[in-house]
Amino acid sequence: MNTSTPSTIRVNMLGFLPGLPKNIVLLSDNDLNVLDEKGNQVKSFSGISLRFDEASGDNVASVDLGDLPEGKYILKSGNTEREITVKADAYHEVTDALIKGLYYQRCGCALEEKHAGIYTHGACHTAPASEWGNETVKKTVLGGWHDAGDYGKYVGPGAVTVAHMLYAYLLFPKGCSDDLNIPETGNGTPDILNEARWELEWILKMQKDDGSFYHKLTKAKFAPFIMPEDDKEPEYFMSVSHCATEAAIAVLALAARVYEKFDKDFSEKMLDAALKGWKWVEENPEFKPYAQPEGVNTGYYGDWSDKDERFWAACELFATTGDAKFKTKAEQIYKDAKDPDIIKKELEGNPFFERMKKWNPDFKIPIGLNVTQYGWTDVSGLGSFCCLFVLSEAAGEILYDELKSDFLTKSAETLNLVKSSGYGTAIEANRYVWGSILSVMSNAMTMIIDWKLTGNTEMRDGALNQLNYALGLNALDISFITGFGERRVMNPHHRPSGSDGIEEPVPGLISGGPNKGMNYPEVKERLGDTPAAKYFIDETFSADTNEIAIYWNSPAIFVAACFNAI
Ligand code: 9MR
Ligand code: ZN
């Protein structure tokens, strides 16, 4: 745990890029002096005026240090000093580490010392598993990544994680470097794709003969804090679900294109599986939400609708096959999602909607697909990637022009969030929920896409501020990425990190961060009415504020790879 007091100078602890803005945040209105390594003053800022930041309750001033050549600098404000670095490859190591973070989540194999170093461990979860409630179906499915701090494996979350990685690779190939020291390193395929394949192979095995995909492969209950190889409780294939099936179809169709030039057989296998999955969807068009069986309390990942997954799947299948029926389907879903009568009908008696209304009486009927959402609940934004960058103009009026205009409306709102936050963080004060890092990183992705589409550098800079947030420019003065930054997360809710006897947690994992939504009673008791952006405890028990998850790492990979490529 970090016991030192947070500094009144907040910075990206890894450093800044020479040609881009260098935003820092001050918590005092003293003049700011910038000294070079020899102690010469190179810049100074006076007339600092503080403003109230709602999310943190802090009075802060954001300062862009502007142009500074590569080197180390000392920032001086009153009696406070803080060192920063300006470096062309400031984000290289962390991008690599975030990708390798997924290697450390690999299941069904041992992590060998030559790749994992001190984090080596024995093979885990290698026993055959049966279908929940049906012991006659029993098979051994190895592979995949442990989802998060727990050892569960879930198809939908795995699919979005891979999608973030594949789009990071497609958009910023130079930002995803290729020497991660994983077992496949040097095989001619970029390591980001090698790592993503580990999950894709597992997703393929989660398909049933009828084309559908199991929702998850987990035990009945979360394991205690033990190493994965010591976790011997039986695993079960939980029922199939529409969301899992369609997310799997989408990512397999996408991956079929990406891997084609590296491994044709693998690519064909994935496309066949995707098409077989789609056939199941056509034969079972009526959406049924995943229902957690009695006696099971591992991750739920339930959803009120699958139109976003179906939309994404149709887009990717159209992009891969060119078959117009998928385009028609995607267009239909896009249009229907804007029809209030259709939505109202969809929500009638919907258990998730009923729950939402109970929690939040102001809950508004969601009209239209949320084209800037990329997380496991709403994957519409992954469809945006496909429409905007793969299908592009040729996709026509709905899937390109209309979607692009909807997208740019949302991204403008996102940039406004950055401007209205004292720390420049793209999240409303009341949106610090479980895994708030997903909102922050997703909003960075949105601004990056806008920048790629329009060339608006304000968007790029807004996105950069979110990477800054992850690396220390925040109300806690903490780097949320394990292994990086002088004040970094040390006790994430992560079973291997909490049980391996090593002080430093497994590196390259990103914490979910402040959450003032649904909290553990002990967290509520200790934090009380602490402002949302500080609702965080760097202790192992606090899964609600300090767990790690594969699908939080992956948007961070996307954002880091973008700036690593600049
Ligand atoms: O990411 C999930 C978050 O959106 C939910 O609010 C939270 C509580 O239901 O669950 C998160 O997912 C967890 C999953 O259920 C099990 N593995 C760990 C995940 C990260 O906390
Ligand atoms: Zn395992």
Image (cartoon, rainbow, N blue to C red):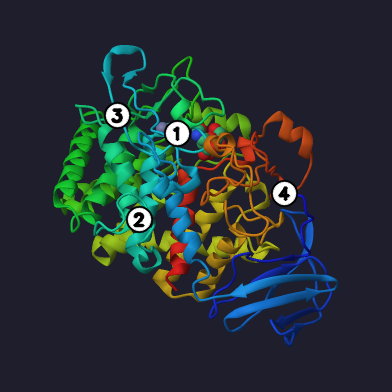
* Ligand 2 placement by image quarter: top left
Which of the marked residues, 4 or 2, is nearer the chain's N terminus? 2
Q: Amino acid at mark 3?
A: Val
Residue at point 43%, 37% (across, down): 146
> Label 4 to label 3, Cα distance in Å?
41 Å
Assess whether mark 1 and mark 2 are in contact (beta carbons under 8 angstroms): no
Which of the marked residues, 2 or 3, is nearer the chain's N terminus? 3
Return the residue at label 1: 303
On the picture, is 536 further left or further right than 286? Answer: right
Numbered circles on residues, count? 4
Name the secondary structure under disc 1: loop
Which of the marked residues, 1 or 4, is nearer the chain's N terminus? 1
Residue 400 in sight: yes
Return the residue at label 4: 534
Q: Amino acid at mark 4?
A: Lys
> Label 2 to label 3, Cα distance in Å?
23 Å
Residue 371 in sight: no
Query: Of residues 22 and 289, which is closer to you in this image?
Result: 22
Which of the marked residues, 2 or 1, is nearer the chain's N terminus? 2
Which of the marked residues, 4 or 3, is nearer the chain's N terminus? 3
Name the secondary structure under disc 4: helix
> Label 4 to label 2, Cα distance in Å?
33 Å
